[in-house]
Image (tube, helix red, strand yellow):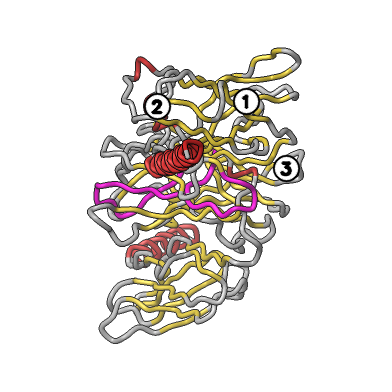
Amino acid sequence: MTPTLRALICLGLSVGLRTQVEAETFPKPTLWAEPGPVIPRGSPVTIWCQGTPGAEEYRLDKEGSPAPWKIQKPQETGDKVNFSITHMTEYNAGRHRCYYRSPAGWSERSDPLELVVTGFYSKPSLSALPSPVVTSGGNVTLQCGSGQGFHRFILTKEGDHRLSWTLDSQRQHSGQYQALFPVGPVTPNHKWTFRCYGCSRDSPQVWSLPSDALELLIPGESGKPSLLSQQGPIVASGQSLTLQCRSDVAYDRFALHKEGGRDLPQSLVLQPQAGLSQALFPLGTVSSSHGGRYRCYGGYNLSSEWSAPSDPLDILVAGHLPDTPSLSVQPGPRVASGENVTLRCQSRRPMATFLLSKEGAADPPLHLRSEHRAQQFQAEFSMSPVTSTQGGTYRCYSSNSTSPFLLSHSSEPLALLVSGAADTISPSQNNSDPKSEFPAAQPQDYTVENSIRMGVAGLVLVALGVLLYEARSSQKQIQDAARM
């Protein structure tokens, strides 16, 4: 046998043996983490590696660390092991793989598991553009931002950390760092709740604290709730503001949305009363940022469906303009039912709109555009003919077109007294919206006053009678004396 032939035979035998060994290599195991791959700093986590029965040893490698990182032997009848981490730190974060040894040799390595630790930086903010209220099938952009110099932002969908998206941050002129995540189409099949994190390029598995949760809201067609302010539609700076959303439908939760707002405060339902489900939204101390148009929605805990929106509620913040208008009434503050009455609101400053509010009224104030007359800006609110229900105390405010929800200081109060029976007029007789009619004031009672007047008149008549009788008696005595 020639040397060349002998070499070829040896090569063929070695290739055959290698192919047989590779055919007997066990398949790669499965690797996962409980409760999940994204773990808060200091919390426990368990890493599981599952292979096949008969495995004698499992090993866990961490990228960048000496191998093996951890070693574990399985139970006699088990086909998996766990590697426990009692306190998650940045040193445990990273990319992990596991594999096992059987009598026939080593298995393939598992797919990588990214283990992330959170809580090493302050939380970023998460908002929806243009709004968290999205029509079914629509798209929305989620903005994650921070003043810290994060190189990347990560967006996660709550309930499934396997659904995450990572984008490089962009520095804005304001000095803020942000990333914009397009999301959609949005459908009501499941909840759309998100959080975002920031991280450094050098430590991609070490994340910040999570942002506040942001849930997208998809309005439906079920019964709309009602929204009202416990303090009335006009509030002053420094006052405490609470909005109430309620419905006769048994909703489990309510959401409040401010027009132009990027967040969506939610509240659980209070104890139902008189068949009503309701929730309170305490908005804190009033400032200029509270002015705006609000709506609320009703929903269920186990469903992503939401109700139709409530009718809008405008919250107006008084005292944010240096103007203080004046309020006057024609023909006067005391009128009879059926007369024509005009309330005039005036200011020397150029204001766009005047508002007339009745004390104690829950309805929104009346609005009129201002007119420039005799070096004054004014608006005239007509009550023609006036009824006793329109009696009460009025104030007026002014606003400009750039900030329609910020009002001037209040005018001095004006008390309108309407005497006579409470007449009922049709909406066509009143140029104001009948829905905006102010609550009725109590009619003035003149019964006691008239009784006093009649009593005084009776006493005067009695006194005159006594004087007349005495005068006649004196005159008779004089005549009798003259005869004698």
Residue 1 to residue 307: above or below = below
Q: Position of residue 111 (x, y in %)?
A: 44, 60
Q: Which residue is mark 2?
A: 387
Q: Which residue is mark 3?
A: 171
Q: Is residue 231 left or right of residue 192?
A: right
Do the residues bearing badges 3 and 1 touch, measured as CB atoms within 8 Å?
no
Residue drawn at (50%, 21%) of the image = 341
> Which quadrant of the view contains residue 12?
bottom left
* Residue 234 lies within the magenta run: no
Q: Position of residue 392 (x, y in %)?
A: 48, 37
Count every numbered label the image shows and give the total.
Answer: 3
Q: Is residue 366 left or right of residue 17?
A: right
Q: Position of residue 425 (x, y in %)?
A: 33, 21
Mark 1 surroundings within 10 Å by alpha-carbon count, few (fewer than 14), some (14 through 19), many (20 or more): many
Name the amino acid, label 1. Answer: Cys
Numbered disc 3: secondary structure? strand
Quarter that holds the N terminus: bottom left
Numbered disc 2: secondary structure? loop
Q: Pick whichever of labels 3 and 1 is earlier in the sequence.
A: 3
Residue extending farthest to the front is: 484
The magenta-colored residue range is: 235-264
- Mark sitting on residue 415: none
Disc 3/disc 1 C-alpha distance (Å): 49 Å
Q: Is residue 285 left or right of residue 48?
A: right
Q: Would residue 47 be seen by someone viewing this image from the given angle?
A: yes
Q: Position of residue 448 (x, y in %)?
A: 40, 44
Residue drawn at (35%, 71%) of the image = 50
Q: Nearer the viewer, residue 265 or 246?
A: 246
Residue drawn at (43%, 40%) of the image = 469
Residue extending farthest to the top is: 373
Q: Nearer the viewer, residue 79 or 286?
A: 286
Q: Which residue is mark 1?
A: 345
